[in-house]
Image (cartoon, rainbow, N blue to C red):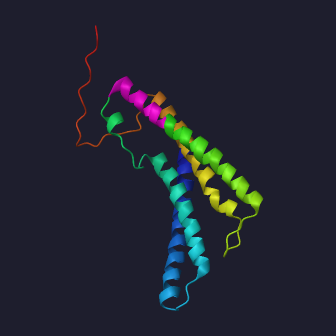
Amino acid sequence: MRRIADTLLRSGIIVVFLILLVCVSWQVFSRYALGTPSTVTDELARFLFMWLALVGGAYTYGQGRHLAIDLLPTSRRGRTRRLNEVLITLLIAAFALIVMLWGGMQLVQRTLASGQISPTLRIPMGWVYGAVPLSGAIIAAYAAGNLTLIARGGTIFNPPEDIPLPPEPEAKR
């Protein structure tokens, strides 16, 4: 199931990126070669960039390639390391669920209820802001998968090979 979700997200991100590339290229061409910048591609590029950043960030978290300060979890071993990973994952999940999913849904609902539409494309701004709760749901799903991995004895933070880990503590007798 995770492999299918990863493939769908990756494919969607690639498509959005390609559309964004075309929009920005046309914007540059129309501005400098034709002398009249395209307002449609300007607005579309802004909205696509927002979706790309949020959904791409969620996908990156799921792949374990996100920017992270992992000094604490990677410098520990055994139970302490597992506890650190669980706490960090729970904090990420809480942020994703409370701020991004719940708060994002509130934002989308209020914006749709107000009838706010984009100036050029004339689409409801709630659709644009929909990237926030969607990304929160994706991050929360990945966090749940990470918690399952940790519970099975796996690890989500892998230290770089050039940083030595401290020795295993000796077992108490």
Q: Is residue 161 left or right of residue 5?
A: left
Q: Nearer the viewer, residue 156 or 41?
A: 41
Q: Nearer the viewer, residue 160 or 54?
A: 54
Q: Residue at x 51, y 63 (%)?
A: 14
State the quadrant of the C terminus.
top left
Q: x and y percent of residue 99 in the render?
A: 59, 45
Query: Magenta region: which residues?
Result: 77-89
Q: x and y percent of residue 3 in the render?
A: 53, 47
Q: Is residue 153 left or right of residue 113?
A: left
Q: Residue at x 53, y 56 (%)?
A: 54
State the quadrant of the N terminus.
top right
Q: Residue at x 65, y 56 (%)?
A: 130
Q: Residue at x 48, y 36 (%)?
A: 89
Task: Inspect the magenta stretch and tell me whether residue 147 lies in it.
Answer: no
Image-quadrant location for residue 8: bottom right
Query: How many badges with numbers are in the image?
Result: 0
Q: Main secondary structure of the magenta part?
A: helix
In the rendered image, the vertical position of residue 121 relative to residue 78, given as above or below:
below
Q: x and y percent of residue 35 in the render?
A: 52, 91
Q: x and y percent of residue 101 in the render?
A: 62, 46
Residue reaching furthest to the bottom: 34
In the rendered image, the vertical position of residue 159 relative to residue 17, given as above or below:
above
In the rendered image, the vertical position of residue 72 relative to residue 45, given as above or below:
above
